[in-house]
Image: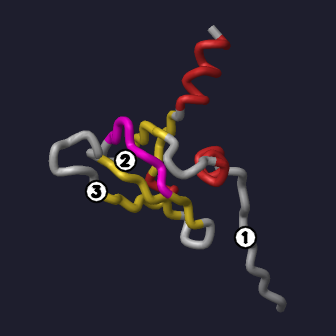
């Protein structure tokens, strides 16, 4: 009897957003554990599916880099997504 391995692929809108962001874009990111406001998007690694952000950048000590798996991101707001929401209203 033959055995088959089935792999389900689906379009993840968060992942698509991350792939299109440019470094330095300001984002608000909600994860399963935290919300990061006014973070600076640094990069997205398509291989590992992880995004690197600079958070807490307005504090006197400066910001810190944070790497988050795209699977943990619940919502991602950018200036562009905020503008689109305002236009839709």
Reply yes or no: does residue 41 show up in magenta: yes
Pointer 2 residue: 32
Q: Is residue 39 magenta?
A: yes
Magenta residues, start to end: 35-42
Question: Which of the labelled discs sits on residue 7, or is there none?
Answer: 1
Task: Identify the element where label 2 is drawn.
Answer: loop
> In the rendered view, how is the structure colored?
secondary structure
Judge left or right: residue 27 versus residue 8.
Answer: left
Circle nearer the N terminus (2, 1): 1
Image quadrant in which you'd find residue 84: top right
Q: Residue furthest right?
A: 2
Residue 82 coordinates in the image, percent (x, y): 55, 24
Tell me if mark 2 has few (under 14), some (14-19) or many (20+) residues whose alpha carbon lies within 10 angstroms of its own: few
Q: In terms of depth relative to the viewer, which is nearer, 5 or 12?
A: 12
Tell me which label, 1 or 3, sits earlier in the chain: 1
Q: Nearer the viewer, residue 70 or 8?
A: 70
Q: Residue at x 83, y 91 (%)?
A: 1
Number of other residues with Cα within 10 Å of mark 3, as a class: few under 14, some 14 to 19, many 20 or more: few
How many numbered markers are drawn?
3
């Amino acid at each position: 009897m033959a055995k088959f391995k089935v792999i389900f692929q689906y379009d993840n809108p968060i992942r698509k957003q991350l792939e299109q962001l440019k470094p330095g874009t300001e984002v608000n990111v909600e994860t399963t554990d935290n919300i990061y406001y006014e973070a600076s998007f640094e990069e997205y690694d398509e291989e590992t599916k992880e995004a690197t952000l600079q958070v807490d950048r307005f504090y006197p000590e400066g910001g810190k880099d944070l790497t988050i798996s795209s699977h943990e991101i619940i919502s991602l707001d950018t200036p562009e997504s905020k503008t689109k929401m305002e236009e839709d209203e």
